[in-house]
Image: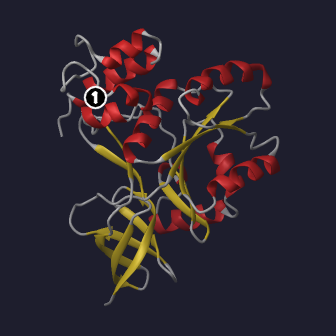
Amino acid sequence: MSNIVGTIIAAHGRHYVAQTDSAKLQCVTRGKKSDVAVGDIVNLKLTSADQAVIESIAERKTLLYRSDQYKSKLLAANVTQLFIVVATEPGFSDDLVSRSLVAAEAAGVAVHIILNKIDVTESLAKTRQRLSLYSGLGYPVHEVSARATPEATCALLAPLLAGQSTILIGQSGMGKSSLINLLVPDADIAVREISAALDTGKHTTTFTRLYVTDPGTAIIDSPGFQEFGLYHLSEGMLERAFPEFAPHLGKCKFYNCHHLNEPACAVLGALEAGQIAPYRHALYQQLVHEASQKLY
C-alpha cells in the first residue's frame, strides 16, 4: 500500500493518532520505538482502512521535552510557542514556570505566560507581583478569565494563536481545560473521537492532543504535570537558556567557567550587582547539578 503523510494529533503510550488529509488513523511504530511526538509530521504505511505504521518522522523544527534521571518524555514537536497557564488560585509553582521557560529557551520556542482567573481579586495583587519577576525578564504576561469573561479572553488570545502551533502547559487547577474549551470549538467532540481511536476510554486527560483550529493554526493540550525535569540539557545549553546571562557570557576570566563559584566570573559578578535574580541563579545551579546526574 502507498505511503501517506500525516500529523500526529494524539499520543498515549506507544499508540498514536495521525490526521491525514482525509482521515484519522490509529498508528503504531515499528518495533519498540516510542520517539514520536504530538505535532510530528510522519510518513505512514496503511495496514488497514483506519490503521497505519509510522515509517519515518520528518525533520523537526522544534522539540519540547522533559526528562528525569532515567528517561525523557516528549511533549510536542514543531511548536512555535508555549503558553504557560497559571492562576490566581490555587497557587502555582515558580519552579515549574521557571523550568518551562528554560525548556522553551533551549528549544527555540517563544513563551507567553497566561494568568487565568483574574476575577479572583483577593490574590490578584500578590500573583501579579510574583509574575513581575518573569515580565521583568521580557516574557509577556497576559491576564484573562476564561470563566468570567470568555469573549474578552478569546479576543485577547486569538491573535496570539493565529498562524502558530501553540502548546499549553500548566498544573492541574489552573483552568487550562476551560481555556482549551473556549479556544477550540468542539474540543469535547474531538477528545471523544481521539479517545475512541486510542481506546483510552474515559482517561481523556492523560494524553497530549493537537487541535487544528484554522489552516496553519494548531493548539496542543498537554496533561497537567507537577515536575519539569531538564536532565537532557547540557551546561552550555543551560547558560544560554537564561536570557539575563547573555550580556555576561564570554566575559569570565576562564573560558570554561561554570558560573558556580569560579573567581572573576562575569555571571557571578552580575549576580552580586543585582542584575541577576538570586532565585534564577539558584535554579541554574540546580539544573547544572541535575544534568550531571543523568543515567540514561
Element on which disc 1 rests: loop
Looking at the rendering, in which quadrant would you find the N terminus? bottom left
Q: Quadrant of residue 262?
A: top left
Q: Is residue 155 left or right of residue 85?
A: right
Residue 61: give x, y in percent of width and height: 38, 59
Q: Residue furthest bottom?
A: 1
Q: Nearer the viewer, residue 64 or 141?
A: 141
Q: Specify the amino acid type for callout 1.
A: Gly
Give me the residue at 69% from left, 47% from top: 178
Image height of 19 relative to 99, above or below? below
Give me the residue at 32% from left, 30% from top: 239
Image height of 214 relative to 184, above or below? below
Applied colour scheme: secondary structure
Image height of 128 relative to 232, above or below? above
Q: Nearer the viewer, residue 195 or 228?
A: 228
Residue 39: give x, y in percent of width and height: 44, 62
| Residue identifier under label 1 | 250
Residue 102: give x, y in percent of width and height: 41, 35
